Image (spheres, coloured by chain):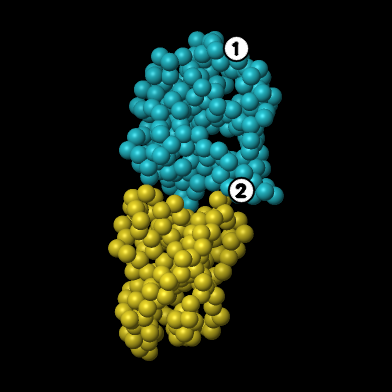
């Protein structure tokens, strides 16, 4: 289900080292094509529910689906291998389109340390907004939505994350993100 | 500073009715003063503002362009507006409309280009009593975005949209800064530039 390249023990070792050095790692072509497509298909079967708290967020929330549950064991093993300790995961499935965003919120300032996200997206122009941004004392980390990519981020003490407002140039395009910690 | 050189006589004459509107307006106290400046003066100000240097500002909450505080501007026309707004005569008029006594101001120019926005927040910061925006763009239609949006609130948290004010040429918006003054500037979805002068009375 996860691209077999990432399950190779030598590659795992490289990823572990890279994560330790950079505090983040991005893995393109993360799931096998059939699993990626099934995931998208199953999510699209749901209508999702628009969630908005104006001073905090706006997005579409989807229910958990079976294929993600099936995937989670393999995923938690991989994450554990990269960060060097076992993890217990939780995640949300959300959709972001025009007028959606999340804002940095005080209650999240001392948030979770390790975060991950997986994206299913049409070809995306970052001028549409929707980038996932990690800010802190260093240069911000900016992740443009990229289909079938997986990112793992070690949020240092002073780091906050948000999803940039998506502007009208996105038209009817939207992407799906599985966010977890 | 002679206020009536700048401000329309009709505005000064209707302070009482403006005060009433300010007090009864929901979801928090505010008033939109139409045809605020004498027309030629407003034209001069927008021409001057377009010559100022605007810096791009981008964070989770906003993407827009802004000038430095105009207290330090070298532009004569903008200096005059700054002096007008901070004059005791003008602050007295603001007090008569809002019932709130202010002693000093902030003022900066803002520019929202296509796709720019300012998301929901309450403006609260120590000392801010009244927020103001003087709209200096040719009229926007509501579908073109750029509206000032006020939110209803429950338990001091913003809930639904209460009111929308598309930027109306030469009108002055005044609203009271409070724990429930939740507002946003909708994304500009037109190719028009949305210029305004704004800030706070402290």
Q: Nearer the viewer, residue B153 or B53?
A: B153
The percent coordinates of residue A50 (x first, y second) are 51, 59
Q: Residue at x 59, y 28 (%)?
A: B31
**Do the residues at pointers 1 and 2 share their chain?**
yes
Question: Does A141 appear above or below B133?
Answer: below
Q: Nearer the viewer, residue B42 or B146?
A: B146
Q: Which residue is mark 2?
A: B158
**Left or right: where B104 falls relative to B137:** right
Q: Residue at x 43, y 36 (%)?
A: B142
Figure chain in yellow: A
Q: Which residue is mark 1?
A: B13
The percent coordinates of residue A174 (x first, y second) are 38, 60
Q: Residue at x 56, y 15 (%)?
A: B11
Q: Chain of mark 2?
A: B
Q: Secondary structure at mark 1?
A: helix
First-in-chain label (1 vs 2): 1
Q: Secondary structure at mark 2?
A: strand
Task: Measure how far apart labels 1 and 2 are at the Cα level.
Answer: 35 Å
Q: Residues within 10 Å of mark 1 (few under 14, many from 20)?
A: few
Q: Chain of mark 1?
A: B
The percent coordinates of residue B153 (x first, y second) are 64, 46
């Amino acid at each position: 289900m996860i691209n077999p390249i990432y399950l190779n023990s030598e590659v795992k070792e490289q990823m572990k080292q890279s994560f330790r050095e950079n505090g983040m790692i991005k893995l393109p072509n993360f799931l096998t094509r059939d699993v990626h497509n099934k995931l998208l298909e199953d999510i699209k079967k749901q209508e999702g529910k628009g969630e908005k708290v104006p001073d905090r967020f706006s997005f579409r929330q989807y229910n958990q689906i079976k294929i993600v549950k099936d995937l989670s064991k393999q995923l938690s093993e991989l994450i554990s291998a990269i960060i060097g300790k076992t993890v217990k995961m939780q995640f949300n499935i959300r959709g972001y389109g025009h007028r959606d965003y999340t804002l940095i919120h005080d209650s999240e300032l001392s948030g979770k340390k390790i975060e991950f996200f997986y994206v299913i997206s049409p070809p995306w122009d970052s001028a549409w907004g929707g980038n996932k941004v990690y800010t802190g004392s260093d240069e911000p980390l900016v992740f443009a939505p990229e289909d079938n990519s997986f990112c793992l981020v070690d949020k240092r003490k002073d780091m906050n994350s948000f999803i940039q407002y998506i502007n009208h140039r996105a038209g009817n395009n939207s992407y799906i993100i599985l966010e977890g910690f | 500073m002679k206020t009536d050189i700048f401000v329309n006589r009709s505005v000064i004459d209707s302070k009482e009715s403006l005060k009433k509107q300010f007090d009864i307006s929901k979801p928090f106290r505010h008033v939109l003063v139409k045809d605020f400046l004498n027309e030629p003066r407003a034209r001069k100000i927008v021409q001057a503002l377009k010559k100022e240097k605007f810096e791009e500002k981008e964070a989770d909450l906003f993407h827009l362009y802004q000038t430095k505080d105009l207290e330090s501007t070298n532009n004569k026309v903008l200096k005059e507006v700054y002096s007008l707004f901070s004059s005791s005569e003008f602050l007295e008029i603001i007090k008569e409309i809002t019932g709130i006594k202010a002693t000093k101001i902030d003022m900066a120019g803002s520019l929202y280009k296509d796709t720019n926005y300012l998301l929901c927040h309450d403006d609260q910061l120590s000392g801010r009593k009244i927020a103001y925006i003087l709209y200096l763009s040719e009229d926007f239609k509501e579908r073109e975005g750029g509206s000032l949006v006020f939110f209803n609130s429950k338990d001091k948290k913003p809930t639904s949209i209460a009111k929308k004010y598309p930027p109306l040429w030469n009108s002055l918006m005044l609203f009271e800064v409070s724990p429930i003054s939740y507002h946003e500037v909708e994304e500009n979805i037109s190719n028009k530039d949305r210029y305004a002068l704004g800030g706070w009375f402290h």
